[in-house]
Image: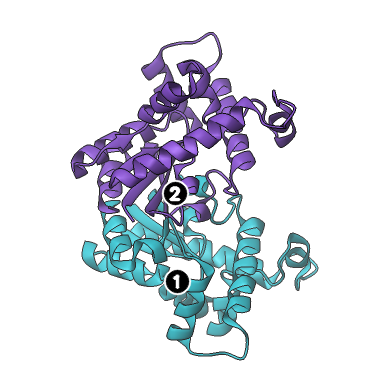
Chain colours: A cyan, B purple
Amino acid sequence: MNRIITISRQFGSAGHTIGKLAAQKLGIPCYDSEIIDEVVKQSGFSHEYIKDKSEYASGTNWFTSALNSRDLSGFSHQDEVWAMQCRIIREMAEKGPCVMVGRCADYILKDIQDIVRVFIFADMEDRAKRIVEQYGESPVDPVKRLKDKDKRRAAYYNFYTDIKWGASENYDITLNSAAIGIDKCVDIVTMLY
Amino acid sequence: MNRIITISRQFGSAGHTIGKLAAQKLGIPCYDSEIIDEVVKQSGFSHEYIKDKSEYASGTNWFTSALNSRDLSGFSHQDEVWAMQCRIIREMAEKGPCVMVGRCADYILKDIQDIVRVFIFADMEDRAKRIVEQYGESPVDPVKRLKDKDKRRAAYYNFYTDIKWGASENYDITLNSAAIGIDKCVDIVTMLY
């Protein structure tokens, strides 16, 4: 079993930055968009499509997700992406210790690797400020964007896993990155290794 | 404003131990049973009565709590203990930086002190093992005891505060002490000061 730090995070909570910096400090790889790249390569779907389908439900409830573009066998494109992503995450984890950001790695690797499950979040106001700084202004209000992303990500988790996304009992540690500060979060995540 | 670490914790999760050790390392006081002692002194109620009433609802729902031994003015003994406890916690916090374990200090001190809100929990199995080690065997099954304590503590929080007890978004950090280990939890809590 490899020691793997899985980071699940709210959009705009700096989870990606914290994961990258912790991995750098530990001298181990951090997989985030690398997971998407690999699914894109193996599936032939576009990067944008996979980025969305690999972590967000099409609707915000089970029913919409369940009915979303299924073929006659009941298998949807999103199910296909899910199965591929599971295999790729398991293969990456087998290579050695690493940090994995997002994509339900906490659920996919549990019981088969020695994982530390981290959840990173922040208050809505701080996240809204951060996404505008990071990705620029958008015609859609940042709070509305964040609420939509949160809902769809939670629905995705609820559909494909038995984990309630963001509920403290499903993680070894949850961190409010805005309250604690990014540097301190990096130090704490590093300590968990 | 004083920097105060508030530790909310599940029964049997070593929250008290972690708070005491972190305070020792930081060279600041840790208030836990000291809060009860002060309420006992000021109220004239017994230690056992205050220990129970200062953190646990009599029933597990709002209705039972609301109807519990109220006088004609609608004020219950538990309300009296709550008001006294709020005052005592605020006074203790004014003395200087400290660690406060339990008794809704996170809620009572928010906006009036510079608080770091910690929640400590552990898996049921680990907590059951711990309470038997710490407090000995009891005629009641430890898992049943823990479930009852959890329910009554959550009900108490729901009745007196607007905090959902144990929900990650209400804390700056939540820690699974069994997964992370007590020593590492102490180090992390110390870092938050």
Chain label for disc 2 = B
Left/right placement of residue B15 relative to residue A62 reads left
When the figure is inspected, residue A100 is found, relative to residue A107, above or below; the finding is below
Q: Amino acid at mark 2?
A: Leu
Residue A4 image offset from top left, x and y in percent: 35, 55
Q: Amino acid at mark 1?
A: Ile
Residue at numbered disc 1: A35
Farthest residue in the front direction? Answer: B73
Residue B114 image offset from top left, x and y in percent: 36, 56
The residue carrying pointer 2 sits among few (fewer than 14), some (14 to 19) or many (20 or more) residues within 10 Å by Cα, namely some
Q: Is residue A46 visible?
A: no
When the figure is inspected, residue A34 is found, relative to residue B105, above or below; the finding is below
Chain label for disc 1 = A
At x 72%, y 31%, the residue is B73
Of A72 and B80, which appears nearest the observer?
Answer: B80
Of B18 and A86, which appears nearest the observer?
Answer: B18
Left/right placement of residue B189 relative to residue B130 reads left
| Element at label 1 | helix
